[in-house]
Amino acid sequence: MTTSTVELSVAQAWEHLRTEKIGRLITLIDGAVDVYPINYVCSADTIVLRTHPGSKLFGVAVFRDVVFEVDHYDPAEPVAWSVVIHAMAHIDTRISALADADAADLHPIVDIDADDLIVLKPYRVTAREFTLHS
């Protein structure tokens, strides 16, 4: 299988992001890189993640510079894509933000109490689309 790659615009990257629900948050904690699958929603020019207390929240509190990555691949489709976002993260403790997350249908993908919100403010967005050839 061969592929051809096309760089996408920032607008196209955001269009793709709005079609998925799960991405990967990449943090740096004590010199080690950690990767966490997490559900998300896009809100204007930010990405909102919902989680519970633990290493993700600790990592964001200590080192706010993070990477968020979302891919799409379906063997039935001839095109796959990847979006990588470099962002500054902050924890949003406002009660109204949690209500907004509920209204946007941002709920944990596993059965846990997840009432902590991480907001990502991107400073660099890159995306690529891959046309797959057999």
Image (spheres, rainbow, N blue to C red):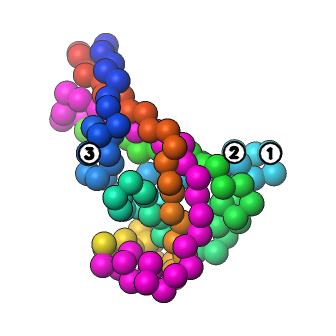
Q: Residue at x 48, y 59 (%)?
A: 38
Three-letter code for the amino acid on which mark 1 is drawn: Gly
Q: Is residue 111 visible?
A: yes
Circle 3: element type = helix
Asked whether disc 3 touches disc 1, contact meaning CB atoms under 8 Å apart, the reply is: no
Locate residue 104: give its quadrant: bottom left
Circle 1: element type = loop
Is 65 covered by the magenta stretch? no
Tell me the mark number nearer the camera, choosing from 3 and 2: 3
The dot on residue 33 is 2
The dot on residue 31 is 1
The dot on residue 15 is 3
Which numbered disc flags the more N-terminal residue, 3 or 2?
A: 3
Against 55, is 75 above or below?
above
Against 63, is 114 above or below?
below
Three-letter code for the amino acid on which mark 2 is drawn: Val
